Amino acid sequence: MEFILRKTDYAMRALLKLSRNIQGGPISTSVIAEEEDISYPLACKLMQSLQQARIVKSCMGPAGGFELVRDPAKISLLDIIETIQGPVVLGKCQSRENGCERKPDCPVTVKLGELKDHMENYLAGVTFADLVSWERPGRE
């Protein structure tokens, strides 16, 4: 079972690239696709989704591309997951529209809800500024 879908991982790679280039101007989708090992058509779709969520903006012209709208410290992993995949749902019983009728009295649902809350809090607390400044342990 994958919690983070491949396309979400790719969107995170693209956002990390833009976060590392915050003062360097726009980066084209073709450069993002090539340098982050994302197919160009998928990179285009992901950048469009991120633009609709007002996380990135498109800059036209010969030196155009995409750049961040928000400070990397204000963009979390949860923001990207929810933009690309939708809300965090661990099981059908957690779903709002098709939830289980046993939900109010089910200890499994309660525990899954607690896990979901922990996951969302953790993911909301990890920003792209954190990822830019991250150093691999043991590296100098």
Image (cartoon, rainbow, N blue to C red):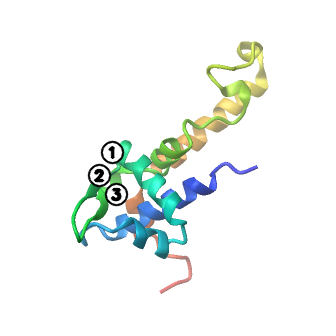
Amino acid, disc 3: Pro
Residue 72 marker: 3
Distance between the alpha carbons at the discs numbered 3 and 2: 6 Å
Residue 126 marker: none
Distance between the alpha carbons at the discs numbered 1 and 3: 13 Å
Asked if marks 1 and 3 touch (Cβ < 8 Å), the reply is: no
State the residue position of label 1: 54
| Residue drawn at the location 55% of the way across and 41% of the way down | 120
Asked if marks 3 and 2 touch (Cβ < 8 Å), the reply is: yes
| Residue drawn at the location 53% of the way across and 47% of the way down | 122
Q: Residue 61 placed where, x, y %?
A: 21, 65
| Residue drawn at the location 69% of the way across and 20% of the way down | 98
Amino acid, disc 2: Arg
Rendered view: 33 above or below 8: below
Asked if marks 2 and 1 touch (Cβ < 8 Å), the reply is: yes
Q: Residues within 10 Å of mark 3 (few under 14, many from 20)?
A: many
